[in-house]
Image: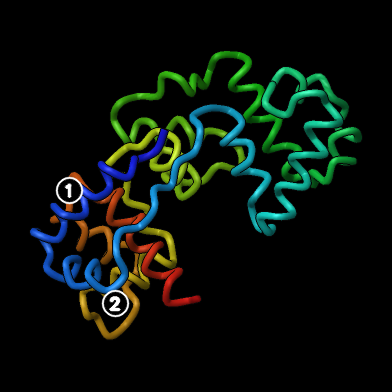
């Protein structure tokens, strides 16, 4: 499970001591709610379904998939279904391939989501071996579903925007700059990312 509310507050309070800009922004917008997902195959499959579509569209595909194959959370049932059957649920040809790649790795035991390596980079490497799972998706999974406290998705646009604003930079930084800036925030970078999304969403609204 992801980082809980208590752990999130502890990490953000620690960050406020390391970087005063966190303290200032915390006073303005408050603590973010936790972002928690279940560990395992269904969460990763939903990540694939959600790529480049709205949350509502992804949820609709998940429901149709669940109805069609009997249990969308069972990778063996996805593998047993014909491609055309899966296409009928709203899965594109590309996402069909991605979903099958994930299901095959899980069913064969090649990818054991209950026992990913403790080292974050090693865990990311295993996840990106799945077709359709890039570094960002892997990082978000490890942060939300496993609650790893030091995951830092520096390639995320909102994280880049808010890190730049937080530190008073005049232009949006790139991934390398954001990654370098956050080195001082270890081992609390996961909380920093959740806070960045919280700050970004408040400003957008």
Residue at 67% x, 26% y: name it.
73
> Which label belongs to residue 45?
none
Expressed as whole percent of the image width and height from the top left, the position of residue 75 reads 68, 22
Q: In which quarter of the image is the N terminus?
A: top left
In the rendering, at what x and y percent does residue 110 appear?
53, 18
- For mark 2, give the secondary structure: helix
Q: What residue would you read off at disc 2?
A: 165
Residue 112: percent from left, percent from top: 49, 19
Label 1 sits on residue: 186
Q: Nearer the viewer, residue 105 or 8?
A: 8
The percent coordinates of residue 172 (x first, y second) are 34, 77
The residue sitting at 31% across, 82% down in the picture is 171
Which residue is found at the position 41% from the left and 44% from the top? 139
Q: Nearer the viewer, residue 130 or 199?
A: 199
Horizontally, is 53 left or right of 81 in the view? Answer: left
| Camera-nearest residue between 170 and 199 | 199
In the figure, residue 15 lies in which quadrant? bottom left
């Amino acid at each position: 499970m992801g980082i809980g509310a208590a752990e999130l507050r502890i990490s953000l309070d620690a960050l406020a001591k390391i970087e005063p800009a966190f303290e200032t922004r915390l006073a303005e917008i408050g603590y973010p709610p936790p972002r928690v997902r279940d560990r395992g195959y269904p969460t990763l499959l939903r990540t694939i379904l959600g790529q480049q579509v709205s949350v509502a569209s992804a949820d609709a595909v998940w429901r149709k998939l669940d109805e069609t194959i009997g249990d969308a959370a069972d990778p063996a049932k996805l593998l047993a279904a014909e491609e055309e059957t899966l296409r009928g649920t709203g899965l594109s040809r590309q996402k069909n391939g991605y979903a099958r790649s994930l299901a095959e790795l899980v069913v064969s035991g090649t990818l054991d989501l209950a026992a990913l390596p403790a080292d974050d980079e090693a865990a990311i490497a295993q996840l990106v071996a799945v077709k359709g799972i890039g570094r960002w998706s892997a990082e978000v999974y490890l942060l939300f579903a496993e609650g790893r406290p030091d995951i830092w998705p520096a390639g995320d646009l909102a994280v880049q925007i808010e890190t730049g604003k937080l530190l008073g930079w005049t232009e949006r930084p790139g991934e390398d700059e954001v990654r370098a800036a956050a080195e001082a925030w270890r081992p609390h970078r996961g909380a920093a990312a959740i806070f960045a999304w919280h700050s970004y969403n408040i400003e957008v609204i």
